[in-house]
Amino acid sequence: MRPTLKPDDIHILISHARRTAKAFVPGGNLLWKAAALTEGVADDVDLPGGDTPMGLYKCGLITKTQPDEPAHIWASYGPWFIDLIDLENQETGRGRAGIGMHGGGTGLANPLADDQPLIATHGCVRWKNGFLKRALIPLVHDVQKQGGTVYVTVTA
């Protein structure tokens, strides 16, 4: 399903195979292109920890990880987590929950680095921390503040 964008909406199209994301404004003009990873640690999309299920989502709550949280939270998610709400039953229909977009990377030398390597997640979309801070978080925040929606489509 392709969303019908209202004037304040944004559509992010993430290609699993290309490991890239492109953001589009209403009318189809490209806003930006960035690296994004949808690979999971499990081999099967139907299992917890598998690839991010393909389909249409919308961005929900933005959460900033806090300094008093355990180190594994910082390592896993980096400084930000954006909840993804499935719109086609692609996540909940598999009995999965909690998929989102974040940076970080458990096992990396510096999971909070701006330009950390993108490694597999447990089903989420992983971004570079610096890109999250510079572009994605401000975009989602501004769109939601204006009453718009940030749609995310994950494709093969």
Image: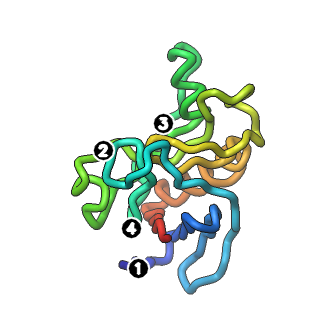
Residue that numbered label 2 is attached to:
97
Who comes first in sequence, dot 4 or dot 3?
4
Q: Are marks 1 and 2 in contact (CB under 8 Å)?
A: no
Q: Which is in the foreground here, disc 4 or disc 3?
A: 4
Q: Are marks 3 and 1 in contact (CB under 8 Å)?
A: no
Q: Is residue 134 or residue 43 the one in the foreground?
A: 43
Q: Are marks 1 and 4 in contact (CB under 8 Å)?
A: yes
Mark number displayed over residue 2 = 1
Structural distance between the alpha carbons of marks 1 and 4: 8 Å
69 up-or-down from 39: above or below:
above
Q: Position of residue 17 (x, y in %)?
A: 58, 67
Q: Position of residue 155 (x, y in %)?
A: 48, 70
Q: Judge the density around disc 1: few (<14), some (14-19), many (≥20) Cα neighbours within 10 Å.
A: few
Who comes first in sequence, dot 4 or dot 2?
4
Choose top left, top right, bottom left or bottom right for residue 98: top left
Residue that numbered label 3 is attached to:
63
Under mark 3, the amino acid is: Thr
Q: Judge the density around disc 4: few (<14), some (14-19), many (≥20) Cα neighbours within 10 Å.
A: many
Left/right of residue 47 with respect to residue 153 in the rendered view: left
Structural distance between the alpha carbons of marks 3 and 1: 26 Å
